Image (tube, rainbow, N blue to C red):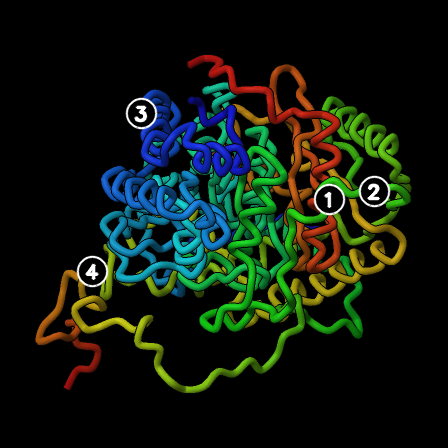
Amino acid sequence: MDLLGLTIKDIEESLKKGVFSCQELVKESFSTIKKHDKKINAFLTLNEEQALKQANHYDNLIKKDKNIFDEKPLLGIPVALKDLFTTKDIRTTAGSKIIGDYNPPFDATVVKKLIDAGAIIIGKTNEDAWGHGSSGENTDYEVTRNPYDLNRVPGGSSSGSGAAVAYGGVLVGTGTDTGSSVRLPAGFCNLVGLKPTYGRVSRYGIIAMASSFDSIGHMTRTVYDNAKVLEVTAGVDPFDSTTVPIKVDQYTKKLGQSIKGMKIGLPKEYFVKGLDDKVSNSIKNSLKILEKLGATVKEVSLPHTDYAMAAYYILVPSEVSSNLSRYDGIRYGGSREMFGAEAKRRIMLGSYTLSSGYYDAYYLKAAKVRTLIKRDFENAFKEVDVLIVPTSPTLPFKIGEKVDDPLQMYLSDIFLCPVNLAGIPGLNVQSGFVDGFPVGMQIIGPQFSEELLYKVAYLFEQETQYYKIRPKFKNG
Amino acid sequence: MSKKTLSTEEILHIAKLGNLTLTEKEVELFKKQLSSVIEYIDKLQEVDTKNVEPLSQTTGLTDIFRKDEPDEKRTLIPEEALKNTKSKENNLFKVKAVLTE
C-alpha cells in the first residue's frame, strides 16, 4: 500500500471490500511519516496512539455496517491539521514557541466536523508562526522542506500540511488562507488547495491571524478529494457569526460536467514584469487545454491590482496586532518576549497603522481601497464566469533566499492576496511542471462559487493528470 | 514619494503600543525593515478614494444574533479553563496587581 497511489474514493472502496483495514492504512501513514519527516519537518506533533485506537474502532464499525460511509463520508481518511487548528488534548502551537506547551480544552468546529465524519487525525503540522509567512521559514521550529527539492521552500504558511500531503503521509492537510497560505503551498507542492469564500467554513477554534480575512481551507492531491472534504467542513456555525447561511452544495456531484461555453477571464494586470516567463508559458498552455475543453478565454482588467499588496499589508497587520494582544502569558503560554521576528514586525506595523494620527492615512484609506478591489472583481465577473491567474510569480524559491528582506517575502503573495481582500474563493490546481518544479494556477470565482471552481478544475485535471507525478526528494 | 525612515523613538513608541520590548539590535533591524514596508504601503495615497466607503465585512452579513443560552457541550468547567495557566489561585487566574494604592 502507498498513500500516494490512493484517493479518498479508492480508500472507501478498499475498506468496504476489505482490501486493507483502517489500521493498516493508518500504520502506513505513520511509517511514511517516519521515513521522510526527519528531513522534511512537516509535523510538530504526532497523534499515533489515538489514531490507531480510532482506526481499530472504525474497522469494527465497518464489519458491522458497510453503509457506515453514508454517515461518515471520510471514514478512516488520514488527515493532518495545521497547528493553528485547536485540538482537544493535542498540543497546539501555532508554529510558535510562546504556546509551545498549549494543550487546548476544546476542538475547533472544523476539527469536530472532520472527526465526526470519520477522519483520523494523524498529527499537527508545521507552519510559519501564527500563519505569518509565505515560505514556512517563519516557524519557531525546524524549517519544512519541499519534497520536490529539499533546498527549496514548500510555500507557506501552511508549509507542513502541504509537504505532508505531497510526500504521501496523509490524504488531506488542512490550512488557513489569510493571503496565500493554502494556495501557495498547494502551488509549490503539486496539490489542489482551496481558499473558500470568507464565511463558508467556520473559524471557531482556529487561532486567529486577521479575522476579516482568515479562510479555512485544505489541500489534497486531487480535485474530487478536495471537494469531498469541503462537503464536510462548510456550513453555518453558531459559534462563528461570520459563517453565511447559504446552502452547502454537494460539490462532488457536478464533477465531470462539461464546461462548454464557459467564459474564462485573464486579468492583464497579472501578466506583467516580475512574472517568470516559464510560469507565464505554463499558464498559457493550460488555457489552451481549457479552450480545447470548450471554454473561451478573454482578457479582462482588474485596475486596482497594483494596490492590493499595500492595502493588504496595512489591514492584515492591523488585525494581527489586535489578535496577538491576547498572548500575555496569563491564561496560557509564555511571555511576549518569545514572539519571533515576523510576529514582532507585524504587531509593530499594525500598531503604527492604527495609531493616533495615522489611522485615517493608513487603515481607513486601505479599507476604502479594499472596496475598490472587491468592485474590480465584481465588474470582471459581469463579463466572465471565472478568472485564471498564476499562483506564484516564480517557481518555488530557495530556503534562505528571502528571509532577510520581509518586503520581498510579502510580494510572493502578490497574485493571491487580492482574493482575500474581496472575500471570494480561489482554487489552486497544477498547471504543469517546469525544470522539475510544480507550477500552480489559480481559478478564481465570485463568492460561493466553489462548485463552479471544482467543475473547471476537475475537467482540467482529468485531461492533464499531473497529480500522478511524485516528489523526487532532490537534494535529500 | 519621499523616502520614509522611522526614527528610534518611533520604533520604541510602536513597540510599546504593541506591548513588546526590543533589544538594541532589533531596534536597528526593524527600523530598516519596517521603513521599507511603510515606504511601499505609502503608494496607496495615489488612489482616489473620494466617495468610496471602507470595507471590512466582505460578504455583507450584519447583526447576527443567537439566543443567550449556554451550550453545555461547548462550555468549559473551571479546571479546563485553568489547565494551561502557570499562575492560578482558588480556581482563578492570578495576575500582577494593576492598581496601586
Mark 3 or 4: the one toward you: 3
Disc 3 secondary structure class: helix
The crowd level at tag 4 (other Cα within 10 Å; few <14, some 14-19, many 20+) is many
Badge 4: chain ID: B
- Image side of residue A85 versus residue A211, left or right: left
Mark 2 or 4: the one toward you: 2
Asked whether residue A170 is in view, the answer is yes
Where is mark 1, residue-wise?
A455
Residue type at tag 1: Lys
Disc 2 secondary structure class: loop
The crowd level at tag 1 (other Cα within 10 Å; few <14, some 14-19, many 20+) is many
> Above or below — where is B58 with respect to B51?
above
> Above or below — where is A7 with respect to A307?
above
Residue type at tag 3: Lys
Identified at 47% across, 56% down, the residue is A209
- Residue A418 in percent (x, y) is at 68, 51
Disc 4 secondary structure class: loop
